[in-house]
């Protein structure tokens, strides 16, 4: 049965509620990790570098799903919190239809621009050919990618996070099996990795589409709708922060690849790929939590329940703090074993990967706070502030650092760029949270404010 989002959540209950979404994001991160494992061990270093170099382009196109999913989910959850279920269903249906159309349009655009983009970024020779073979099927499959990202969020809003987790597990297993058969057994190379990823994304996008199109036990169901440009525009603006964040992550990957080609060659790109596999798995925990908890904050905001908003806010800060410390320790302890899983065939490449991973690990202490801060404002319907945090954090701080720091510290400057950028972004995120708190009340309730005012009038601080 759907979860009642109006009730109070203890920390264990909140973690249990978000756990399926965390699992969804972890299995999503498996797509690239599995591709990297099979490509690296069966196809070699150049093929691994090509996969890592090309993957950001279809990822950018697929971020439409995050925009419609996160921005639209906040609107649908808020509408339900206001008690208008019929309008929430119309909004939900329009979001799904719009995402399908937009995904097809972006796929067509990607087919036209893929090769010129790869050449402009510096790919050439064998690496360019491998990039094209891997990325073209992914670009053509963008509509499935968009649907999968869209339903990751909307299944939570529909009160069915367990179904979302089950679908993502099925999608991840599909990818693993297809990769194993096509790469390890049939020697299809990087094209086998691309087919495996597309197969997994198709499972992740089509199953929820069929579920919502038929009678179900969720709050939401696909059906007739009416064109509401204002709602779509609000969803796009509100979800633009998550779209910007994911586009920015892809652009950051491109920037790293360009710099690493200059300073370390294909070995640097391959080592960065391994770090990103590990980093994606850890960041997926934060992303799954903020995606899973955001509909709860949106619902309570729509219900004007500041007590529960404050409860959710404090528990969320505690969760990301504990996870950040645990991830930092795990990376320091398991850096070498993780490197050997992917590039154990080359001792030099493994040593480079371990060195880079140890420098990168400090960013895990900070990144969760920045991700939660951005998602918080999306949940509250303030897409502008959320987008500013995401934009400045990645497109300004991180890309700026990755081009500036290597001029001062050489290749090591590339590996610590993310740490410097996240630390600078934390100052911005904290400032936004404190300045805008009086408008939303996620730190102090009306009772807190009244009590403080009463104490002040009595001469007490």
Image (cartoon, rainbow, N blue to C red):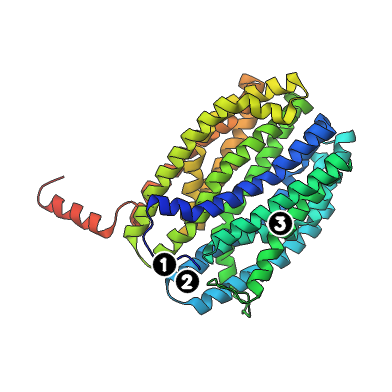
Tell me if residue 81 comes above or below residue 294 in the rendering.
Answer: below
Q: Which callout, 2 or 3, points to the residue nearer the camera?
A: 3
Of 240 and 404, nearer the camera is 240
Disc 2 and disc 1 in contact, CB within 8 angstroms = yes
Q: Secondary structure at mark 2?
A: helix
How far from the left and from the top, in percent, is residue 205? 69, 61
**Which residue is at the front of the view, 398 or 155?**
155
Q: Quadrant of the C terminus?
A: top left
* Mark count: 3
- How far is mark 2 from mark 3, CA to CA? 27 Å
Residue 252 screen position, x and y as percent: 65, 39
**Mark 2 → mark 1, Cα distance in angstroms:** 7 Å
Asked where in the image residue 46 lies, by quadrant, the reply is top right
- Residue under numbered circle 3: 145
Furthest residue toward left: 458
Q: Is residue 205 visible?
A: yes
Circle 2 packing at 10 Å, graded few (<14), some (14-19), many (20+), is: many
Q: Judge the density around disc 1: few (<14), some (14-19), many (≥20) Cα neighbours within 10 Å.
A: many
Q: Tell me which numbered mark, 2 or 3, is placed earlier along the sequence.
A: 2
Residue 349: quadrant of the picture: top right
- Specify whether 86 is left or right of 224: left
Q: How far apart are labels 3 and 1 at the CA level? A: 30 Å
Q: Position of residue 43 (x, y in %)?
A: 84, 34
Q: Nearer the viewer, mark 3 or mark 1?
A: 3
The mark that comes first in sequence, 2 or 1, is: 2
For disc 3, the neighbor class at 10 Å (few under 14, some 14 to 19, many from 20) is many
Which x, y percent locates residue 16?
47, 53
The disc label shown at residue 79, or none = 2
Q: Indicate the secondary structure of the residue bearing disc 3.
A: helix
User: What residue appears at the point 50 percent right and 39 percent down from the top-left corner?
Assistant: 425
Task: From the image, tell me which residue sits under label 1.
Answer: 302
390 sits to left or right of 123: left
């Amino acid at each position: 049965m759907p979860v009642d989002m109006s009730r109070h959540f203890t920390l264990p209950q909140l973690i249990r509620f978000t756990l399926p979404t965390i699992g969804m994001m972890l299995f999503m991160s498996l797509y690239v990790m599995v591709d990297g494992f099979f490509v690296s061990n069966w196809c070699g270093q150049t093929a691994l570098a090509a996969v890592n170099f090309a993957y950001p382009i279809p990822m950018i196109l697929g971020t439409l799903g995050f925009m419609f999913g996160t921005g639209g989910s906040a609107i649908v959850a808020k509408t339900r919190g206001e008690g208008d279920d019929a309008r929430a269903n119309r909004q939900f249906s329009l979001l799904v239809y719009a995402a399908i159309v937009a995904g097809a349009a972006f796929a067509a655009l990607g087919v036209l621009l893929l090769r010129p983009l790869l050449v402009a970024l510096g790919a050439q020779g064998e690496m360019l050919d491998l990039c094209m073979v891997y990325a073209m099927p992914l670009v053509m499959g963008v509509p499935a990618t968009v649907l999968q990202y869209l339903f990751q969020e909307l299944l939570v809003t529909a009160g069915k996070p367990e179904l979302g987790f089950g679908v993502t597990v099925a999608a991840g297993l599909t990818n693993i099996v297809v990769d194993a058969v096509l790469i390890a057994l049939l020697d299809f190379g990087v094209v086998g990795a691309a087919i495996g990823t597309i197969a997994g994304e198709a499972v992740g996008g089509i199953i929820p589409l069929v579920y919502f199109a038929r009678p179900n036990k969720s709050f939401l169901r696909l059906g007739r709708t009416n064109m509401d440009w204002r709602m779509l525009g609000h969803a796009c603006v509100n979800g633009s922060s998550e779209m910007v964040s994911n586009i920015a992550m892809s652009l950051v990957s491109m920037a790293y690849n360009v710099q690493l080609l200059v300073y370390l060659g294909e070995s640097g790109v391959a080592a960065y790929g391994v770090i990103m596999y590990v980093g994606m798995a850890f960041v997926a925990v934060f992303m799954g939590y903020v995606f899973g908890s955001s509909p709860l904050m949106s619902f309570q905001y729509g219900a004007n329940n500041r007590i529960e908003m404050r409860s959710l806010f404090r528990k969320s800060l505690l969760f990301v703090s504990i996870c950040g410390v645990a991830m930092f320790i795990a990376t320091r302890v398991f850096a070498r074993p993780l490197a050997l899983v992917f590039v154990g065939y080359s001792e030099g490449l493994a040593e480079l990967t371990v060195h880079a991973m140890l420098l990168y690990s400090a960013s895990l202490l900070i990144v969760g706070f920045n991700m939660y801060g951005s998602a918080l404002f999306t949940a509250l319907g303030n897409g502008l502030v959320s987008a500013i945090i995401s934009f400045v954090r990645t497109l300004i701080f991180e890309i700026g650092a990755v081009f500036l720091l290597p001029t001062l510290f050489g290749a090591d400057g590339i590996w610590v760029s993310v740490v410097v950028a996240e630390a600078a972004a934390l100052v911005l995120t904290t400032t936004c949270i404190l300045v805008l708190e009086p408008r939303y009340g996620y730190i102090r309730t009306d009772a807190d404010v009244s009590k403080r005012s009463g104490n002040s009038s009595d001469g007490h601080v």
